[in-house]
Image (cartoon, helix red, strand yellow):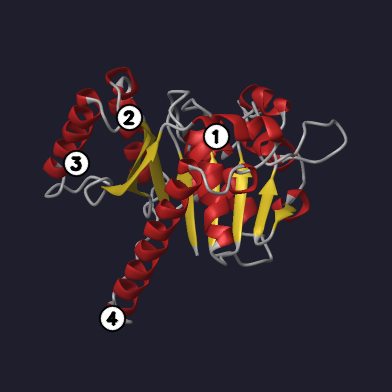
Amino acid sequence: MRSIAVINQKGGVGKTTTAVNLSAALAEAGNRVWLIDLDPQAHASLHLGFGMEEDYLSVYDVLTADVGLDEVRHLVDDNLWLSPAHIDLAAAEMELAGAVGREIILRDRMAEVSERFDYIIFDCPPSLGILTLNALTTVDEVFLPLQPHFLALHGLSKLLRTIELVGRRLNPVLQLTSVVYCMFDTGTRLANEVVEDVELFFEDQRLTDSIWSNAYSFDTRIRRNIRLAEAPSYGQSIFQYSNDSNGAQDYRSLAQEVIQQTAAMQTVAADIPADEPALTPDPFYAPENHFHY
């Protein structure tokens, strides 16, 4: 199983679009996929036709009450499950301010999950607060959606620093594995220049011990496509809304890269000797010494 947080603290870069449509594409390919919406705006939930009614349990209840993740999971399409968000999540930051171990609540709840999935994907809010921290302490990997535009890179160093701190202090297996370029304008020089800059940065990290030293960019570029922008208003993934559009083609291509990546990771894992020492958490970490941001 792969657990992936889709994160960018800057809004409007294709984060939710990628979380939803990558999940849908992986499910379409026959994988069991669970999408968890951690954004108080609940855009991923709305994108899949799940409205913000008052009478259903959401991730907010998982974080603030004695509710398990199994209780807030809904089948929304073949092989695709959703745990919806709710606007009340916006208050979770304040409600959990004094809670011991507030950054690992979701990780503890995930340990209680009864079913198995091939992919668990978290759509994180466009911020670096307690909701994002809960995702980072729970998952093994981070996918970073980027719009190839100068302003979209603003704040990237802060995001990488946050991922690094969580990896060092709270989640020793956390890795930034992949970059997804979204809203890509193939004919512009700026887009290609930004991609080159990002590629050079990650190439320089190859020989370091940073948690993004193995990060690479997917070959698939998610092209700017009006169908991708229209699909959420109909409560549908791009495959339900416009199955033959460029957006559908691009996310299918991205899903195939992820599947190939998964197969390669499984091959590497199978080659590791059985007596190879496993990563262990920081022995000096205790929930009462929780991470401050």
> Can see residue 104?
no
User: Are the residues flagged by discs 2 and 3 in contact, CB closer than 8 Å?
Assistant: no
Circle 2 or circle 4, nearest the eye: 2
Along the line of sight, the residue nearer the viewer: 198 or 126: 198
- Sequence-wise, the earlier of marks 1 and 4 is 1
- Residue found at x 53% / y 54%: 25
226 relative to 82 in the view: left or right: left
x then y, percent, for residue 177: 33, 50
* SS under mark 4: loop
SS at mark 1? helix
Q: Which residue is the site of mark 2?
A: 185
Identify residue for label 4.
Answer: 273
User: Which of 243/31 is in front?
Assistant: 243
Image quarter where the C terminus lies is: top left
Cα distance, mark 1 to mark 3? 31 Å
- The image quadrant of residue 237 is top right
Return the disc, 3 or 4, that comes first in the chain's sequence. Answer: 3
Question: Would you call the spot at circle 4 few (<14 residues within 10 Å), some (14-19), or many (20 or more)?
Answer: few
- Residue under label 3, please give it: 202
Q: Amino acid at mark 1?
A: Arg
Task: Give the residue pinned by disc 1.
Answer: 227
In terms of sequence position, does the residue under pointer 2 or pointer 4 come before the other?
2
